[in-house]
Amino acid sequence: SCRLVILISGRGSNMQTIVETIARDRLDAQVCAVISNRADAAGLAWARQQGIETRAVPHRDYPTREAFDEALAEAIDAFQPDYVLLAGFMRVLTPGFVARFEGRLINIHPSLLPSFPGLHTHQQALTLGVQWHGCTVHFVTAQLDHGPIVAQGVVPVCAGDDPDALASRLLAVEHRVYAQVVRWLAEGRVSLDERQAVNVKGVATRAFLP
Ligand code: GAR
């Protein structure tokens, strides 16, 4: 069975969707732990209620990023996951951490990468006037919000959208895309080739329409 550790910082709706998808679809996967850099993350309480192991590794308890990442890595390693899924995890990870989990670390970012890395992606999309916005599930590399793309989903930008409206339209697609990626991981379909491009065996498209 595919062992997953999910890292969150807040609400945890993507994490919740992943947990529910595994149960509903009876996937050959298990969420071994949900770990947060914030002890008061709403998603941690939800996971605990489901009987999932949770851990808090508060970043403010550590003097440096390296020290935080070392503690985080130790908390993760205790669960021996096949994959570590970032789902609304809002800390930048050090190159050392990324190297330690190379090929096993996956993130969801709320834009169509390579557009709009970083924060405030919905505001950035509205400011630039793009007509399609989206989300990207990708392998994590040392460069922030880059790395081999597993899947992307799109939503239209609509007249009168503010960042919250656009974010909530996109969130529903994020949930669909991340759930499908977890299905592919559970089925052992996802690999990286020698050029570090993603291959998903037997899957014709990794593009998700609204
Ligand atoms: C999601 O929109 C996710 O794409 C984004 O945070 C939100 C978390 O929501 N992630 C990032 O911005 C990563 N830099 P959730 O906690 O309800 O899943």
Image (cartoon, grey):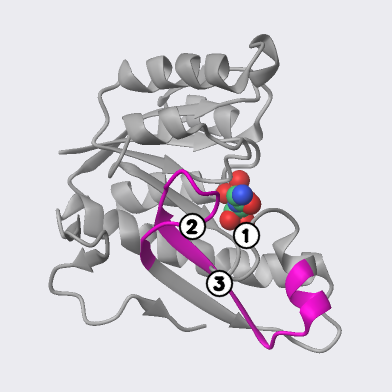
Within the magenta stretch, is there residue 140? yes
Q: CA distance from mark 3 to mark 1?
A: 9 Å
Q: CA distance from mark 2 to mark 3?
A: 11 Å
In this figure, which residue is indicated by the disc labeled 1?
A: 117
Q: CA distance from mark 1 to mark 2?
A: 8 Å
In this figure, which residue is indicated by the disc labeled 2?
A: 146
Q: Closer to us: mark 2 or mark 3?
A: 2
Q: Residues within 10 Å of mark 1 (few under 14, many from 20)?
A: some
Within the magenta stretch, is there residue 209? no
Amino acid identity at mark 2: His
Q: Does the CB distance between marks 2 and 3 fall below 8 Å?
A: no
Q: Earlier in the sequence, mark 3 or mark 1?
A: 3
Q: Does the CB distance between marks 3 and 1 fall below 8 Å?
A: no
Residue at 70% across / 65% down in the picture? 167
Tell me the magenta residue range. Answer: 124-150
Task: Determine whether the residue tagged by mark 2 lies in a helix, strand or loop.
Answer: loop
For residue 112, the mark is 3
Q: Nearer the viewer, residue 40 or 145?
A: 145
CB of residue at label 1: within 8 Å of ligand 1? no
Q: Earlier in the sequence, mark 2 or mark 3?
A: 3
Amino acid identity at mark 1: Pro
Query: Can you see residue 25?
Result: no
CB of residue at label 2: within 8 Å of ligand 1? no
Amino acid identity at mark 3: Leu
Q: Does the CB distance between marks 1 and 2 fall below 8 Å?
A: yes
Q: Closer to us: mark 3 or mark 1?
A: 1
Q: Earlier in the sequence, mark 1 or mark 2?
A: 1
Q: Picture coordinates of residue 119 (x, y %)?
A: 71, 53
